[in-house]
Image: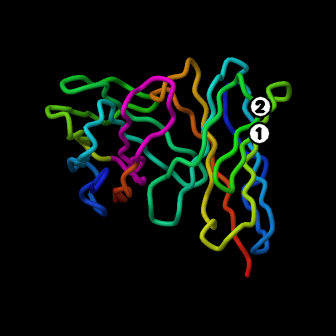
């Protein structure tokens, strides 16, 4: 069925290392993908998005890669900091509408000192 | 600006009781949403609104009602709470509903139904 999921539920990295969080989607009609960060006790916060006509997009310390061939999305965080510890969700839309966002179950990123 | 504010932040109900969650946004956004978040699962859309006076069903609307009488407010009601509605509820808003995933979320309302 249609779903957005994550390869790993948890990820631990050393402070200063790069982090890679992965996400798989199954609907080839999905055309817009978003990453959200959720810190403990808070609501999700938009990080970065990418449309299906792109395969890479960069932000501040973050890069999102999209591989439509294998329906895979990844979030790369450079020089991971303690403040990056959070749950990261990928989300997709079909038809480009925010009201049709489907969220994955999340990956817990823990940054080790 | 406060952004998106939800009240109350915590609530405990008995089965069969009713309650209303209030969401307020001060960004003049047209679109507003109510999601629920359960352990090990992603956010699921309950209801949404594309403007004042309008509402529509999302993925999991059963057992909930909503109203958008004012542009800045979006209310989520439970008429007869059930234990299955124990969850964390998030309200969100966005400037438009198309081609943007940038939703602005509140900090959540944790509801426990006994």
Q: Is residue B113 above or below residue B77?
A: below
Horizontal placement of A15 versus A39: left or right? right
Q: Residue at x 31, y 50 (%)?
A: B4
Left or right, B54 with reference to A14: left
What is the crowding at mark 1: few (fewer than 14 residues within 10 Å), some, or many (at least 20)? some
Q: Which residue is mark 2?
A: A55
**Element marked by disc 2:** loop
Q: Which residues are magenta?
A: B82-104
Label 1 vs 2, first from the N-terminus: 2
> Quarter-wise, where is residue B39 in the image?
bottom right
Give the Cα separation between the discs numbered 1 and 2.
6 Å
Q: Is residue A78 magenta?
A: no
Viewport quadrant of the C terminus of chain B: bottom left
Identified at 24% across, 46% down, the residue is B26
Is B90 placed above or below A69 here?
A: below
Q: Which residue lies most toward the bottom here?
A: A113
Image quarter where the N terminus of chain B lies is bottom left
Disc sitting over residue B81 in the figure: none
Mark 1–mark 2 CB contact (< 8 Å): yes
Which residue is labeled 1 in the image? Answer: A65
| Chain letter belonging to callout 2 | A
């Amino acid at each position: 069925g249609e779903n957005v999921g994550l390869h790993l539920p948890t990820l631990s990295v050393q402070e200063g290392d790069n982090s890679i969080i992965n996400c798989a989607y199954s609907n080839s009609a999905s055309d817009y993908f978003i990453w959200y960060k959720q810190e403990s006790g808070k609501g999700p916060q938009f990080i970065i998005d990418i449309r299906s006509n792109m395969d890479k997009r960069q932000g501040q310390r973050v890069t999102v890669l999209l591989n439509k061939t294998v329906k895979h999305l990844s979030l790369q965080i450079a020089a991971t900091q303690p403040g990056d510890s959070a749950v990261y969700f990928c989300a997709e839309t079909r038809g480009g509408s925010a009201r049709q966002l489907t969220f994955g179950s999340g990956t817990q990123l823990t940054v080790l000192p | 600006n406060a952004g998106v504010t939800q009240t109350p932040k915590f609530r405990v109900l008995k089965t069969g009781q009713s309650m209303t969650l209030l969401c307020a946004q001060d960004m003049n956004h047209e679109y507003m949403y109510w999601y629920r978040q359960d352990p090990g699962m992603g956010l699921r859309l309950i209801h949404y609104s594309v403007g004042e006076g309008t509402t529509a069903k999302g993925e999991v609307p059963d057992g909930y009602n909503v109203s958008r009488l004012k542009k800045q407010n979006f209310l989520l009601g439970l008429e007869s709470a059930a234990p299955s509605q124990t969850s964390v509820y998030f309200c969100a808003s966005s400037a438009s509903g198309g081609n943007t995933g940038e939703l602005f979320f509140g900090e959540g309302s944790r509801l426990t139904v006994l």
